[in-house]
Amino acid sequence: MKTTRRFIQFAFLALVLAAVFVWRANAELWCPFGGVEAIFNYFTEGSMLCSLGVTNFYVLGGVIVMTLVVRRVFCGYLCPIGALSEWLHTLSTRLGVKTVHVPPNVDRLLSLLKYVVLAIVLWLTWQAGELIFRGFCPCYALISRHGTDITYWAYVAAAVTVFFSLIFTVPFCRWFCPLAAVLNPFSRFGFARLRRSSSACVSCGKCATVCPMSIPVDQLKEVTVARCTACMNCVESCPKPGALSWKLKGIAAPGRHSPQLQQAMLITVLLLCVTGMVAATYLFPMPSFVKTSRATPPATTAQVTLQITDLTCRGRANLLVWFLQRDDLSAIPGSAPGEPGYFKLEAWPGPNSAEARISYDPTCCDDLTIKQAITEPCFDINANQWRASPFTIEGYDILAP
């Protein structure tokens, strides 16, 4: 059972590393905590933080669903920092390094730190409008391409996490991870419950010893604590068949089956949630940047969808808005003086050609007017100079008659 979980951890980490270093993908788009960081900005300003996309919301939703069903299974099977921390501790144990066991009272106090970290991260992120935690995240330091958006504090955090993982079991996951703080309320009411049969249990204590989250399994009738990661180490270590088993509330209890089949059921839920979040990303592609020019739409609206180069991030999308709202000879006319002719910009910023969908009043302008406003040089009154547009539109030549 541990071998199966290790295989899933290794396969997922290998996939992440290949995506980042081989396919040059942006791993931040698939980070569930990115969805937490971006919620405030997206629903108040209509834009994602730079490097993030609505994919983060789908991933966060999928992780929450799997947490509601089988508790923090994401942490036990898919989280890269959790996997690396576990492996390092296993290696140190085999090399003879003694594990430091924290007293339960101290462990409970330390576990509160992750809520403090979450509050600080969200406050600073919402105030700055930037990914503050990225500069301190040990996971980002380990699996990013180490560009200019990373600080040395991230490497310090990674080094500290590596060191303490050698003497403690998953210290970052237990005490500091802000995502764990987000998932705990959902995990607390998860459908999956580990049950201990008092009649079958021989009170050997092995289940509590092997638990990476220091849960006193041998003292509980039913494990409902939020930090359970469904690793099933306790079930595998139990010398009495049937003494420990998983039960899903309202569903036929998998505890009647073998531990291997119980784990297969947990993994099935995990894979279904992962498949669902990936499918949702492609089936329901929500824009990651939305900006409207006024509160109410015009009586009639038309839309034009354009492929625009250099529309790479939120900053560039805001610059595109600036060109759409220009006030010169290439301005988009509206139905009233001083009223912009365009109504809404929906964009999917990306590293290459990015899609932008623009809604406008067809009684005042047309597609050509929109394209000219985006690509023609614009006079910046504040700077008292002309500014060339960095944007080009696929299939449109600004010099064509």
Image (spheres, grey):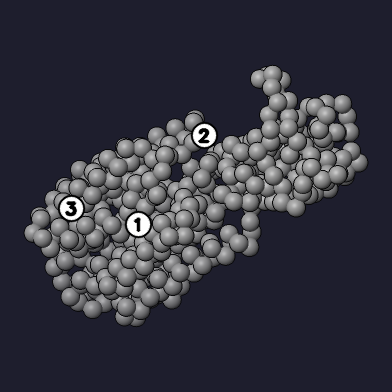
Front residue of 223/77: it is 77
Front residue of 192/249: it is 192
Front residue of 308/239: it is 308
Image mark for residue 80 = 1
Image mark for residue 351 = none
Say what secondary structure mark 3 lies in: helix
Residue 304 visible, this angle: yes
Left or right, 95 with respect to 329, comes to left
**In percent of the image, x 77 and y 42: which residue is there?**
398
Left or right, 327 with respect to 11, comes to right
Image mark for residue 166 = 3
**In percent of the image, x 23 and y 70: which residue is there?**
198
Q: Please state which amino acid type lies under the numbered disc 3.
A: Leu
Q: Earlier in the sequence, mark 2 or mark 3?
A: 2
- Determine crowd level at label 1: few under 14, some 14-19, many 20+ residues with C-alpha closer than 10 A: many
> Whole-percent x and y of residue 152?
32, 37
Figure check: 296 above or below 301: above
Q: Earlier in the sequence, mark 2 or mark 1?
A: 1
- Determine crowd level at label 2: few under 14, some 14-19, many 20+ residues with C-alpha closer than 10 A: some
Mark 3 and mark 1: Cα distance apart in space: 16 Å
Residue 244 visible, this angle: no
